[in-house]
Image: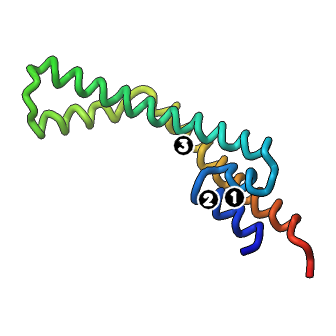
């Protein structure tokens, strides 16, 4: 498999920046990985906060587990005020992934000897 193909697959399927590490471009790879992990942290933090709020409301209702009530609480939690932050993190992650794939391909192609 060519270097460009391997780098693209690593960047696309593992994590943005993994292909750069394979191509021995560590600073680009580390930058892309750091940005991606920061975005993923925003997602996890938001999910944990929403789950905590749902559990707190369930507990304040007496702890009875009713599927309809749980469904209502989850629906209410998903309309939070942090939607702009999560949307921004989503766009940054998608952009980072795209840049990582394209740049890994470009770098891999430039490293491949011409026959």
Rendering quarter of residue 71: top left
Residue 101, numbered label: 1
- Of circles 1 and 3, the one toward us is 1
Mark toward the viewer: 2 or 3 = 2
Q: Residue at x 69, y 58 (%)?
A: 101
At 66% from the left and 47% from the top, the residue drawn is: 96
Q: What's the mark number on residue 47? A: none
State left or right for residue 69 relative to residue 3.
left
Residue 41: x percent and y percent? Answer: 52, 33
Q: CA distance from mark 2 to mark 1?
A: 6 Å
Q: Residues within 10 Å of mark 2 (few under 14, many from 20)?
A: some
Identify the secondary structure beneath mark 2.
helix
Task: Determine which of the numbered discs, if any, sits on residue 90 in the image.
Answer: 3
Q: Please identify the quarter of the rendering in which residue 4 is found.
A: bottom right
Instruction: Determine crowd level at label 3: few under 14, some 14-19, many 20+ residues with C-alpha closer than 10 A.
Output: some
Helix or strand or loop: what does disc 3 sit on? helix
What residue lies at 71% left-to-right and 52% top-to-bottom?
Answer: 99
**CB atoms at circles 1 and 3 under 8 Å apart?**
no
Rendering coords of residue 23 (x, y %): 79, 57
| Image quarter (top left, top right, bottom left or bottom right) of the C terminus | bottom right
- Depicted 14 relative to depicted 28: above or below: below
- Expressed as whole percent of the image width and height from the top left, the position of residue 57 reads 20, 22
In space, the residues marked 2 and 3 are separated at their CA atoms by 16 Å
Of mark 1 and mark 3, the one earlier in the sequence is 3
Q: Nearer the viewer, residue 33 or 95?
A: 33
Of labels 2 and 3, earlier in sequence is: 2
The answer to whether the residue labelled 2 contacts the one labelled 1, judged by CB atoms less than 8 Å apart, is yes
Residue 107 vertical placement versus 1 (above, below): above
SS for callout 1: helix
Please tell me which of labels 2 and 1 falls first in the chain. 2
Q: Quadrant of residue 39?
A: top right
Residue at the spot of label 2: 12
């Amino acid at each position: 498999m060519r270097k460009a193909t391997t780098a693209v697959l690593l960047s696309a399927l593992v994590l943005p920046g993994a292909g750069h590490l394979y191509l021995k471009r560590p600073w680009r790879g580390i930058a892309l990985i750091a940005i991606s992990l920061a975005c993923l942290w925003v997602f996890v933090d938001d999910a944990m906060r929403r789950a905590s709020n749902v559990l707190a409301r369930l507990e304040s209702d007496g702890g009875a587990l009713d599927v309809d009530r749980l469904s209502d609480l989850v629906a209410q939690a998903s309309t939070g005020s942090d939607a702009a932050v999560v949307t921004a993190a989503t766009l940054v992650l998608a952009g980072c992934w795209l840049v990582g794939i394209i740049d890994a391909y470009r770098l891999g192609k430039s490293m491949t000897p011409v026959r």
